[in-house]
Image (cartoon, rainbow, N blue to C red):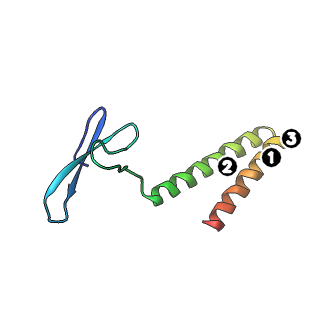
Amino acid sequence: MVRLTGAEIFVRCMSSDGVPYQERYGRRDGVRLGGGRAELVEPEPENAVLREERSVRRIDALFRRWKRDRDDLDALRSLRDAISDYLRDRVDG
């Protein structure tokens, strides 16, 4: 990334013959402005890490909810389902 403005992201690129140039992308949607269609994307490992962090935070919140009232069977079922989903994602990975 070269520069960030209120509405655009400027990215420095290199042509196949070694000439540097810049491309502009919209901050709202990450789509290139002008030229053919292109989008900025997040690398998959970051997406996977974020997804796992969300799952862990969800499990933690559900555990705290159940811990406040251990007779709440709905909270316990939600916790069980969240843990099952997390483990299934880890195995299917």
Relative placement, left or right, of 46 versus 52 is: left
Q: Secondary structure at mark 1?
A: helix
Quarter placement of the C terminus: bottom right
Q: Which residue is mark 1?
A: 76
Q: Residues within 10 Å of mark 1 (few under 14, many from 20)?
A: some
Instruction: State yes or no: discs 2 and 1 in contact (Cβ < 8 Å).
Output: no
Q: Nearer the viewer, residue 81 or 9?
A: 9
Q: Which residue is mark 3?
A: 71
Q: Secondary structure at mark 3?
A: loop
Q: CA distance from mark 2 to mark 1?
A: 11 Å
User: Is residue 75 in sight in this rendering?
Assistant: yes
Q: CA distance from mark 2 to mark 3?
A: 18 Å
Instruction: State yes or no: discs 1 and 3 in contact (Cβ < 8 Å).
Output: no
Task: Identify residue type, mark 1.
Answer: Leu
Q: Secondary structure at mark 2?
A: helix
Q: Which residue is mark 2?
A: 59
Tell which circle, 2 or 1, labels the residue nearer the N-terminal end.
2
Q: Nearer the viewer, residue 42 or 53?
A: 42
Nearer the observer: mark 1 or 3; the answer is: 1
Residue that lies at the very extreme toward the top in this rendered image = 6
Relative placement, left or right, of 80 versus 12 is: right
- Residue 45 in the image: x percent, y percent? 47, 60
Q: Residues within 10 Å of mark 2 (few under 14, many from 20)?
A: many
